[in-house]
Amino acid sequence: MLYATATGMSMLSIAYAMETVNIYNDERWDSVFSKIQTGFAVTIMLAGIPLLLVSVLRAIRARRAGQDSGGGEAGYVQSMFNTVATRAFSFTFILLLFTESIGTRLAPEQSADFFLNALIAVILTFFSLSFWFEILNSSIQERRDE
């Protein structure tokens, strides 16, 4: 579940980065970018929906068996997600302040659509990299604890 979440966020960040670049490309690249983005969307849906269903079914089974449905891996994933989301949220404000104050001076001819897609791409990239860092950090901690 951890790797699927981090991979999905990475794919989303790449899709938004491609959309940012695509704004200023000529039309021959539109079909290429469109196919890659469609491939990412299909992959995320094909992987994400079954993972979500398995997670929900496990929670339902645990609840019926009288067990705590929020423990174990689900709690761990949620905790890691909260940590990474907090970092990404903080980074978002810093990035927005930077873009507001300096972005228009560096690239005054760029459209708002460009800046919006670029900001989303950078934020999702930061989020996914933070997620991968947390996964790596927790694996190192587990090895040390053994």
Image (cartoon, rainbow, N blue to C red):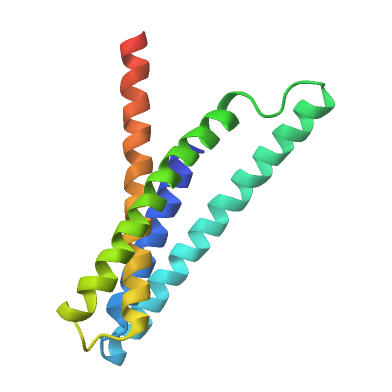
Q: Position of residue 52 (x, y in %)?
A: 63, 46
Q: Position of residue 111 (x, y in %)?
A: 31, 86
Q: Is residue 14 above or below residue 131?
A: below
Q: Quadrant of residue 34?
A: bottom left
> Going 33% across and 65% down the picture, which residue do you hit?
96
Q: Is 32 or 109 nearer to us in this picture?
A: 109
145 on left or right of 67: left
Q: Position of residue 20 (x, y in %)?
A: 31, 76
> Going 34% across and 64% down the picture, which residue do you hit?
121
Q: Quadrant of the C terminus?
A: top left
Q: Is residue 103 above or below residue 46?
A: below
> Going 27% across and 70% down the picture, which residue do you hit?
99
> Going 46% across and 35% down the picture, which residue do you hit?
80
Q: How many marks?
A: 0
Q: Position of residue 110 (x, y in %)?
A: 25, 85
Q: Is 137 or 44 nearer to us in this picture?
A: 137
61 on left or right of 9: right
Q: Residue furthest left?
A: 106
Q: Residue furthest bottom?
A: 27
Q: Is residue 123 above or below residue 17?
A: above
